[in-house]
């Protein structure tokens, strides 16, 4: 059975479809599809009371940008086949450093941010080194990191500390309003819709992430390691460096999430974002990132963030629904997506069997 | 050092805990030559190569490469020097595309530090067509068969401009066509001045393609020969120190014409995977399954044993129709199955030899009737003796045994259940000549004791030597059945070829 | 279960380090404050008191769950939902005890539903959800982290719904006995833990079930071909941990005398996993040790008690715990263990597949 002899290389459009028809990319489509479906449902049910306004749409971004930033780093970690449970703890620590540093010690908040970045990235790299060189499972290493960070945070302060710095609050309140042309003049649309620094930060980080994954050797090495670490080693790829980078970068993203959240709530608290790491992981998984590694797309993660954000939005519009229904809905959504992942993975394995053995 | 010698390893020694793996071994390689490295399992072939590629550090000896003395410290370093290895297991990343696998780690870049995808795809295409392979390089690697993936591995090595290419058991998972193509590629590389080290168990292949042969035994260098000046028989004698005739003095099982019918398989199949296969098997009979890789032999065996559930067809055991939906059912009907991929479906690595051997017997008894340690110890000891498994005791972890001994443990596991029907799927693959013969002898002994055997193998001479009948499969369906005693290799190949001829015309 | 006592094996064994760590901590306690080890008898309650007793008592909830977690991890899985199940168990119990709050508005020494049904229902609903997890992982092949994440997210929501978001209190003596009572001079939770440990030890080591679990955990395919019903084994493990979470939840609810769907069981899954790993069971599945898990859980609780007892700021508990766990993990890691046992050659690099001589 000669099966592969004459499959000629496809041209342009066909190549695009072939790439996109990759079963794993289909999951990203599923994410986008489900998101559109749910949005449609929301539009139909709550369109009258303002669900379909640009304001509502942008608010979803504003309310979840901080998670989105972390989801970018998390996606990369997941692609290598690892996991990072420390992200929310590091974010909380960042917020606490800013709040305590500024409100109590009088240090410039942006200096605190820089310090946090150094610490966060450094600790991330340290975890990555432990994972690679000591072969400690990522789950355990980052779990310990999480406890450590929460612990240090608790030692700094058990109570929430408000951030009162002018420059900081100015950044927190900074808005870019969406405008439209009316009679030759730019006017803010009503109801008022805007984006803020957090949203821009999120967009910047996810674009950067997409660039790394799609266009740099480092990014492709990340995929290779996730596909088969042993092979990657044998192919001469710099596995140690790449893994450490991934965890360091994720540490950096955690710090950014901390900054972003601190801007959002203008305070630092040791119990901030409790359980947040699982929200971030959920976003990545819903976005088509496989927990087994080797598969993940920034586009998918973007929509994963959107999909997870739309649920609390819907609940707010429903009004008298208790918020824990949101948790149940998110759980159901997660279940749906891992179901889809299973089907897609099984299907692509079946396809392979038929084509050539 | 002769002009075109690119590699000279001298006096290599390595000591592992409890065993001296290499003892003053020499090996050299010339540019534009194919040099086969032969020896039984445990002879030290892989260890020698691992020294060269920086995986192990030698205790003594030196390596001169291209005139300079080197000490490779890691696979990365070895690759950077131009020493590239293609392993038996595909060491590529299944989630990346074909083109990417060739270029990962050294992708051509555009300005602005972005990968030039167009260039990657074009160059990959060009590289593969040089080896007469025309495929869509933008598809993920796992879309393609092992044979193609093997080629991609080689293409990567070639593109890195390796000077030395090491092929470690490259043909184990390839069918005849794919092996042909591999050899074409090797000859092409040879013509371009690459030095190729070819490690294999297949002596015929070694003779066909190599210029020189080096034989190792138990960590010692036995000899270095020109391929033309040594015969196969002599070579085997060097490898194991015994005569081949002695080993292969095997007798086909005798089956009385009125013997009971053990197994009747009728139109067994799964749409799209295996077409309706039918065959019978008498008590004490041995039927061999021959065919190219991918012809559906393993799939058929897996259906009979319940590893995969057949969609249609019937199985009758001793005249009664039975339902085999899982291995548990099959075992209940006194069947046994030694799978092809012993790592994936066979050994429980971290458990001891004793626990591995007792596994099926224990699973039959159920969780609530555990075997006492005395019972399981006796069982294990009995089989360690019977199969001559090389181990100091039964508590050693199976993962620490050599391939041949692992296979024996798996065989022991099934023999311990005293089955009436035994299915062996490539039981001698990747095993040295001595152990091969042992296993075949064992198989035939079981037939003599009344066990029916289904024997799947890619080595036609093995099949012909042992089988009462040969069932030939082609393209996932039964192509024909031949008597074992009177057929020759050509007859089997004929049956297989009958199909290909028709296809080639299309 | 044969134990070989040569020095090599002892030094190489992971459980050794767990024991060493515990001994060291206790030694430090002994030196600084010998009263730590004092055990006194209180005739009025018929119980023994002391820090050691306290450690064993307070670690019960985690130990019980960790015993179940040992099997799950041995099967190369995890269960993140146990914390939520603890909350669920308490919710169910309190709901049944205070069923008709209209008629009996105040808490007191009574129960509306007979105690036996309260206990069975609480454990039963956890068994149900545990079975759900088991089904997802064994039958539908979903990854344990993700499959159990669903219930982790949704489980507390369900608990809230059962109790309508209310925190109900009870003073029912038999119920309080679960945590406050004593048998044979020892607090009830210790007795419950001991009984469960004995039952599980017998079940895993006196039957072939333990070996089956190890076999499936190491190589599921090979186990299946060898006639094991791997799906059933996996299912049973998750069902067991469900039941254990239910029992743990009852102890917790009994201690605080109410249900607390927000805080009950928080971080229990993490602590349980840590206990198992410290105890020597590897997260990649295979050989496991129930004894090791118990020691691991005791270590975690010892650290916390140590911290309180010695007046180390309560806020530092978490960080301290993380630090000790970090040390144990590092000591248990492959490279360090090899170094310690002074093996001449660390040459088990498996490269290229087959391990030839």
Image (cartoon, rainbow, N blue to C red):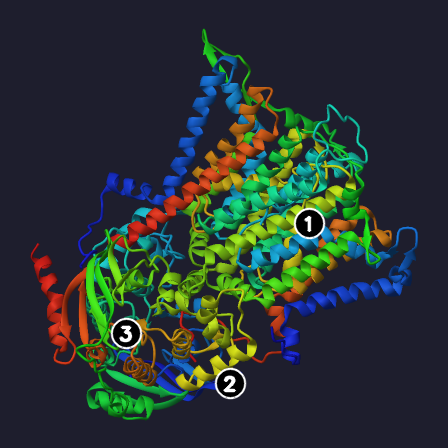
- As drawn, is B296 to the left or to the right of A306? left
Q: Are marks 3 and 1 in contact (CB under 8 Å)?
A: no
- On the image, the x and y values in percent for residue B163 come to 32, 72
Residue B287, quarter of the rendered image: bottom left
At 46% from the left edge and 12% from the top edge, which residue is drawn? A181
Judge whether C156 appears above or below B350 on screen.
above
Task: Give the crowd class for mark 3: few <14, some 14-19, many >=20 residues within 10 Å.
Answer: many
Q: Which residue is mark 3?
A: B453
Which mark lies nearer to you, 2 or 3? 3
Judge whether B450 appears above or below A86 on screen.
below
| Distance between the alpha carbons at the discs numbered 1 and 2 | 46 Å
| Distance between the alpha carbons at the discs numbered 3 and 1 | 58 Å
Q: Which residue is mark 1?
A: A147
Disc 1 secondary structure class: helix
Residue B316 shows in the view:
yes
Closer to the camera in the image, B69 or C262 = C262
Disc 2 secondary structure class: loop
Residue B74 shows in the view:
no
Task: Give the crowd class for mark 2: few <14, some 14-19, many >=20 residues within 10 Å.
Answer: few
Q: Which residue is mark 2?
A: B392
**Image disc number at residue C118:** none
Residue B275, quarter of the rendered image: bottom left
Closer to the camera in the image, B96 or C231 = C231
First in sequence: mark 2 or mark 3?
A: 2
Closer to the camera in the image, B95 or B123 = B95
Q: Are marks 1 and 2 in contact (CB under 8 Å)?
A: no
| Distance between the alpha carbons at the discs numbered 2 and 3 | 31 Å
Task: Give the crowd class for mark 1: few <14, some 14-19, many >=20 residues within 10 Å.
Answer: many
- On the image, the x and y values in percent for residue B82 come to 36, 70
Residue C95, quarter of the rendered image: top right
């Amino acid at each position: 059975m000669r099966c592969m002899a004459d499959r000629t290389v496809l041209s342009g459009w066909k190549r695009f479809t072939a790439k996109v028809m990759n079963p794993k990319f289909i999951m990203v489509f599923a994410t986008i599809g489900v998101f559109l479906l749910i949005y449609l449902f929301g539009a139909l049910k709550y369109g009258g009371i303002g669900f379909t306004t640009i304001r509502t749409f942008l608010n979803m971004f504003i309310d979840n940008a901080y998670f989105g930033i972390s989801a970018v780093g998390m996606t990369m970690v997941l692609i290598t086949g690892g996991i990072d449970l420390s992200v929310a703890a590091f974010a909380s620590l960042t917020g606490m450093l800013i709040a305590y540093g500024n409100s109590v010690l009088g240090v410039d908040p942006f200096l605190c941010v820089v310090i946090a970045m150094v610490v966060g990235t450094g600790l991330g790299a340290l975890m990555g080194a432990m994972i690679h060189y000591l072969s400690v499972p990522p789950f355990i290493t980052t779990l310990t990191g999480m406890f450590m960070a929460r612990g240090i945070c608790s030692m700094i302060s058990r109570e929430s500390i408000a951030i009162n710095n002018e420059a900081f609050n100015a950044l927190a309140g900074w808005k870019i309003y969406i405008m439209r042309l009316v009679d030759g003049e730019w006017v803010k649309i009503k109801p008022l819709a805007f984006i803020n620094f957090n949203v821009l930060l999120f967009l910047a980080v996810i674009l950067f992430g997409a660039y790394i994954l799609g266009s740099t050797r480092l990014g492709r090495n990340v995929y290779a390691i996730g596909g088969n670490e042993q092979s990657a080693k044998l192919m001469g790829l710099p596995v140690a460096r790449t893994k450490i980078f991934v965890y360091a970068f994720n540490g950096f993203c955690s710090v950014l999430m901390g900054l972003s959240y601190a801007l959002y709530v203008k305070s630092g608290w040791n119990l901030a974002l409790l359980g947040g790491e699982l929200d971030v992981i959920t976003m990545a998984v819903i976005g088509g990132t496989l927990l087994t590694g080797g598969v993940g797309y920034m586009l998918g993660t973007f929509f994963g963030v959107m999909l997870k954000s739309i649920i609390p939005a819907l609940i707010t519009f429903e009004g008298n629904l208790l918020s824990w229904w949101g948790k149940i809905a998110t759980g159901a959504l997660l279940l749906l997506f891992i179901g889809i992942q299973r089907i897609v993975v099984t299907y692509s394995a079946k396809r392979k069997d038929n084509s050539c053995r | 050092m002769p002009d075109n010698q690119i590699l000279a390893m001298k006096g290599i020694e390595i000591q592992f805990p409890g065993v001296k793996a290499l003892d003053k071994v020499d090996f050299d390689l010339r540019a534009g030559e194919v040099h086969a490295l032969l020896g039984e399992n445990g002879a030290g072939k892989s260890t020698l190569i691992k020294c060269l590629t920086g995986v192990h550090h030698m205790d003594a000896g030196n390596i001169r490469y291209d005139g300079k003395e080197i000490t490779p410290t890691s696979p990365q370093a070895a690759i950077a020097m131009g020493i590239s290895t293609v392993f038996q297991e595909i060491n590529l990343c299944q989630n990346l595309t074909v083109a990417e696998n060739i270029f990962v780690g050294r992708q051509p870049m555009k300005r602005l530090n972005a990968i030039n995808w167009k260039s990657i795809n074009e160059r990959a295409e060009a590289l593969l067509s040089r080896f007469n392979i025309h495929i869509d390089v933008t598809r993920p690697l796992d879309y393609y068969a092992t044979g193609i993936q093997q080629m991609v591995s080689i293409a990567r090595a070639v593109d890195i401009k390796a000077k030395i290419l090491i092929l470690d058991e490259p043909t184990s998972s390839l069918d005849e066509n794919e092996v042909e193509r591999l050899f074409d590629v090797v000859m092409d590389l040879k013509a371009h001045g690459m030095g190729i080290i070819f490690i294999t168990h297949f002596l015929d292949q070694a003779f066909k393609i190599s210029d020189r042969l080096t034989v190792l035994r138990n960590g010692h260098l036995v000899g270095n020969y020109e391929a033309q000046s040594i015969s196969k028989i002599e070579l085997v004698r060097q490898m194991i120190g015994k005569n081949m005739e002695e080993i292969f003095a095997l007798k086909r099982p005798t089956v009385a014409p009125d013997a009971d019918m053990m197994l009747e398989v009728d139109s067994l199949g799964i749409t799209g995977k295996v077409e309706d296969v039918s065959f019978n098997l008498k008590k004490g009979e041995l039927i061999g399954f021959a065919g190219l890789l991918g012809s559906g032999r393993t799939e058929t065996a897996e259906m009979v044993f319940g590893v995969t559930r057949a969609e249609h067809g019937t199985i009758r055991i001793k005249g009664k129709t039975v339902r085999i939906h899982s291995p548990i059912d099959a075992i209940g009907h006194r069947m046994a199955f030694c799978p092809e991929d012993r790592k994936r479906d066979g050994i429980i690595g971290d458990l001891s030899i004793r626990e591995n051997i007792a596994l099926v017997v224990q699973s039959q008894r159920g969780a609530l009737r555990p075997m006492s340690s005395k019972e399981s110890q006796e069982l294990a000891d009995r089989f360690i003796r019977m199969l001559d498994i090389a181990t100091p005791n039964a508590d050693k972890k199976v993962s620490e045994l050599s391939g041949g001994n692992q296979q024996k443990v798996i065989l022991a596991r099934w023999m311990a259940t005293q089955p009436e029907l035994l299915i062996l799927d490539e039981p001698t693959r990747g095993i040295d000549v001595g152990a091969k013969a042992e296993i075949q002898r064992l198989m035939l002994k079981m037939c003599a004791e009344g066990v029916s055997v289904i024997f799947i193998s890619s080595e036609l001479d093995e099949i012909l030597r042992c089988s009462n009948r040969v069932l030939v499969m082609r393209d996932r369906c039964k192509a024909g059945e031949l008597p074992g005693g009177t057929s020759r290799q050509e007859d089997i190949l004929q049956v297989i070829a009958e199909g290909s001829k028709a296809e080639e015309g299309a | 279960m044969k134990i070989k006592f040569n020095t090599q094996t002892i030094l190489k064994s992971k459980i050794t380090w767990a024991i060493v760590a515990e001994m060291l901590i206790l030694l430090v306690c002994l030196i600084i404050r010998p009263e730590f080890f004092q055990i006194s008898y209180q005739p009025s309650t018929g119980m023994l008191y002391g820090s050691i007793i306290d450690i064993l008592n307070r670690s019960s909830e985690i130990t019980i769950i960790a015993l179940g977690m040992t099997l799950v991890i041995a099967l190369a899985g995890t269960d993140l939902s146990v914390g939520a199940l603890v909350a669920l168990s308490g919710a169910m119990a309190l709901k049944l005890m205070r069923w008709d709050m209209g008629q009996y508005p105040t808490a007191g020494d009574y129960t509306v539903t007979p105690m036996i049904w309260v206990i069975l229902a609480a454990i039963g609903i956890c068994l149900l959800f545990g079975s759900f997890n088991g089904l997802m992982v064994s039958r539908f092949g979903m990854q344990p982290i993700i499959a159990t994440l669903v219930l982790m997210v949704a489980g507390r929501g369900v608990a809230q719904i059962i109790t309508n978001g209310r925190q109900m209190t009870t003073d029912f003596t038999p119920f309080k006995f679960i945590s406050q009572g004593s048998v044979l001079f020892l607090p009830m939770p210790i007795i419950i833990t001991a009984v469960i440990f004995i039952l599980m030890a017998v079940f895993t080591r006196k039957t072939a079930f333990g070996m089956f679990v190890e076999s499936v955990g190491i190589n599921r395919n090979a186990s299946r071909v060898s006639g094991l019903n791997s799906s059933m084994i996996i299912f049973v493990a998750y069902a067991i941990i469900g039941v254990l979470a239910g029992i743990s939840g009852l102890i917790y609810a009994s201690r605080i005398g109410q249900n607390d769907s927000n805080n009950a069981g928080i971080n229990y899954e993490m602590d349980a996993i840590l206990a198992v790993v410290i105890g020597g069971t590897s997260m990649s599945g295979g050989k496991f040790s129930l004894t090791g898990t118990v020691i691991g859980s005791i270590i975690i609780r010892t650290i916390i008690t140590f911290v309180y007892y010695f007046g180390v700021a309560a806020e530092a508990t978490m960080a301290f715990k993380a630090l000790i766990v970090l040390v144990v993990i590092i000591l248990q890691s492959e490279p360090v263990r090899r170094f310690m046992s002074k093996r001449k050659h660390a040459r088990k690099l498996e490269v290229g597949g087959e391990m030839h001589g």
